[in-house]
Amino acid sequence: MGGFFLQQRNQIMKKENFGFRFEPSANVRGLLRRVGAVAALTPLLLLHSVGSGTEESTEPRVLATYHSGVFDESAAEIVAYDPDTHRLFVVNANSSQIDVLDASDPADPVLLASHAFEGAGINSVAVKNGIVAVAIENEDSQAAGSVALMDADGNLYATFEAGALPDSVAFSPDGTKVVVANEGEPNDEYTIDPEGSVTVIDLLVNGSINPFAASATQVTFESFN
């Protein structure tokens, strides 16, 4: 059944004997700092913060599990956490919607709302400073998709055209830009093969972040052909 786990970090883990050190992303560090939990998607777990304090390690402990009610249909695919509202934004690709969960109590995540979007499906979600970015695939996968910006309550700011098959979406560290990777996959017959590209949405307007007046730029790679 589609869902995700909330895991608690008990100790910092050290894996230098394996020849690598994994540093958690800023989102994960913020989540650990604010609520002491990590949002993880079945079967992908966002775990393991590595440090240098001890050689001992303790497996993360499951605090709670949320089930979407749909099995094996991408009903809980990607999770983004907003530390300001303690909400989790979960890609429910099966229903082409974002499920919003209250994780203020990590042991008891509660579904608050679901926000649907037109298109073939939602491929990615990211959140920063209360702005949620959603990458949406076109019904025609070889045609231009879109990126929607909304607030944490689901109120739409604006929608921007992206390239073909927008997938991974992320905010810049300072929160002034949204960047989307457009995969540009061909059709099954390879008769239509759109170029891959990157969509950059500039949220900074007259020195302030304003998602209502943001602008999008399409970055292509044709010059490298």
Image (tube, rainbow, N blue to C red):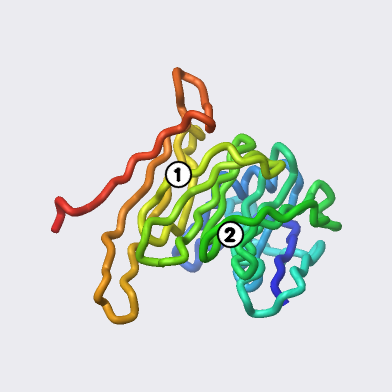
Q: Kindly identify which numbered label has been placed on residue 160.
A: 1
- Circles 1 and 2, Cβ within 8 Å, touching? The answer is no
Q: Residue at x 54, y 51 (%)?
A: 134
214 on left or right of 104? left
Q: Which mark is residue 187?
A: none
**Residue 13, x across and y down, in percent:** 63, 59
The structure residue drawn at horizontal position 39% and vertical position 54%, both measured from the top left corner, is 181
Quarter-of-image position of residue 160: top left
**Residue 51 spot, x, y in % from top left:** 58, 51
Left or right of 202? Residue 136 is right
Q: Mark 1 falls on what kind of element? A: strand
Disc 2 residue type (three-letter): Lys
User: How packed is label 2: few (under 14 Cα within 10 Å), some, or many (20 or more)?
Assistant: many
- The C terminus - image quarter: bottom left
Looking at the rendered structure, the secondary structure element under dot 2 is: loop
Q: Residues within 10 Å of mark 1 (few under 14, many from 20)?
A: some
In terms of image quadrants, where is residue 215? top left
Which mark is on residue 14?
2
N-terminal-most mark, 1 or 2: 2
Disc 1 versus disc 2: nearer the observer: 1
Can residue 179 be seen by looking at this rendering? yes
Whole-percent x and y of residue 211? 53, 32
Q: What is the number of callouts on the image?
A: 2
Residue at left 28%, top 63%? 194
Q: Residue 191 vs residue 83: left or right?
A: left
Residue under the point 35% across and 65% down: 142
* Residue 141 vertical position relative to residue 212 in the rendered view, above or below: below
Q: Where is residue 113 in the image (x, y as percent from the top left)?
A: 76, 53
Could you say which is closer to the camera, residue 76 or residue 144?
144
